[in-house]
Image: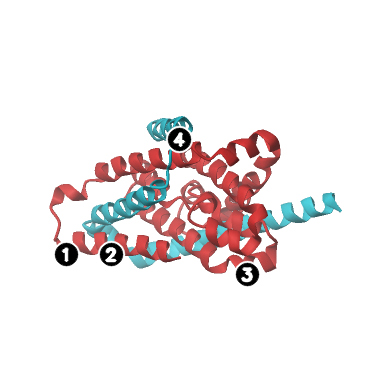
Chain colours: A cyan, B red
Amino acid sequence: MLKVMAVMLSGILAGCLFRRRSRAWLPFVISGFVYLLLLFLGFSIGGNALIMDRLPDLGTEALLLTAGAVLGSVTAAGLIYKWIMRRKA
Amino acid sequence: MKGSLTVVAFFFIGLLSARQGWIPDSWADESISRYILYGLMFFVGMSIGGDTKVVRTVREQGVRMLLLPAGTMAGTFAGVAVASLFVSRTLADCLAVGAGFGYYSLSSLFITEYKGAELGMVALIANILREIVTLLFAPLLVVLFGKYAPISAGGATSMDSTLPVIAKTVGPELVIVSIVHGIVVDFSVPFWVAFFCSF
C-alpha cells in the first residue's frame, strides 16, 4: 500500500517537473494501462473456478453494497448542497 | 460511457480466456496486475501533478475543499453499513468494499491481497458498478439530490472517468470541485481499505 502511494507521489512530482512539456499522450497511456489491468485481472480471476461459480451471488452482493454506497453519498451531497445554498442566500 | 464498456469488455475477455485455458498459467499471476497498477498510478499521479489549475484552486480554497469529499466518505460508509445488513459478510468487509469509492483497480487488488479473491471480486464488481451508475444516472441524481450529487456518486472517479458526464450535467463551474473531490477521495482509498481490512 505504501508502495502505491510512493509511486503515485513520484508521478505527481514528475508531472510538476514536466509541467511545461506537452502531456497530451497521458490520457491515452492511462486508458491503455486501465485496459491492460482489467485484462490481467480477468486472467487471474477467470482461472479461479471457486469464484467463477459464485459469480451470481457475488454480483448481487456487489449490487446491494453499491446501492447503499451511492444512495448514502448522494444524500450527503444533497445535504451539503442545501447547506451551502442557504449560506449563500 | 464507451470507455467504461471497453474496460468491462477487456475484463470479460481476460475472464473468458483464462476460463477456457487459452492463456499460459504465468499470465494469471496476480503480481502482474500489481505492476501494471504501479504503472497506472505513476501516470495518474503525473496527470495530477501537471495540472496547474488544481494546485492553484487548492491553495486558494483550503479546507473548504474537503467538505464534499468528507460527505462522500461519510455517506458511503453509512449507506454501506445499512446495505451490509442484507449481505452475509462482516461490516468491516463491506466497508472495505465501499472504501473503493469507485476505484475498482486499486481497491480490488488490495482487498484480494488482504482478504482473498472472493471479496476482491465483490469489490471489483461493486466499484465498477458505482462508476457505471454515475455515468448512467447523473442527470437524475442532479434532479433528486442537487448539483453535488453526481460528483459524490462518482467518488474517486469524479476526477477522470466520470468527469465528462459530471461536467455536462452540473456545468463547467463545478469541474474543478469535481477534480479536487476525486483526488482527495482517490488518495484516501488505500488508507480506508487497509483500515477496514485490518479487522
Residue receiving disc 3: B140
C-alpha span from label 2 to label 3: 35 Å
What kind of residue is marked 1?
Answer: Gln
Residue located at (42% from left, 34% from top): A11
User: Which class describes the residues within 10 Å of circle 1: few (<14), some (14-19), or many (20+)?
Assistant: few
| Chain bearing mark 2 | A
Across and down, in percent, residue B124 comes to 40, 55
Query: Cα distance, mark 2 to mark 1?
Result: 14 Å
**Residues tagged by mark 4 and mark 3 found on one chain of the structure:** no
* Image spot of residue B49 (x, y percent): 49, 36
Q: Quarter of the image for the N terminus of chain B: give it.
A: bottom left
Q: Amino acid at mark 2?
A: Asp
Secondary element type, mark 2: helix
Residue beneath disc 4: A15
Contact, mark 1 vs mark 3 (Cβ under 8 Å): no
Residue type of the residue flagged with mark 4: Gly
Q: CA distance from mark 4 to mark 1?
A: 41 Å
For mark 4, name the chain: A
Q: Which residue is mark 2?
A: A53
Location of mark 1 (residue): B20
Marks 4 and 1 on same chain: no
Tell me the chain of label 1. B
SS for callout 1: helix
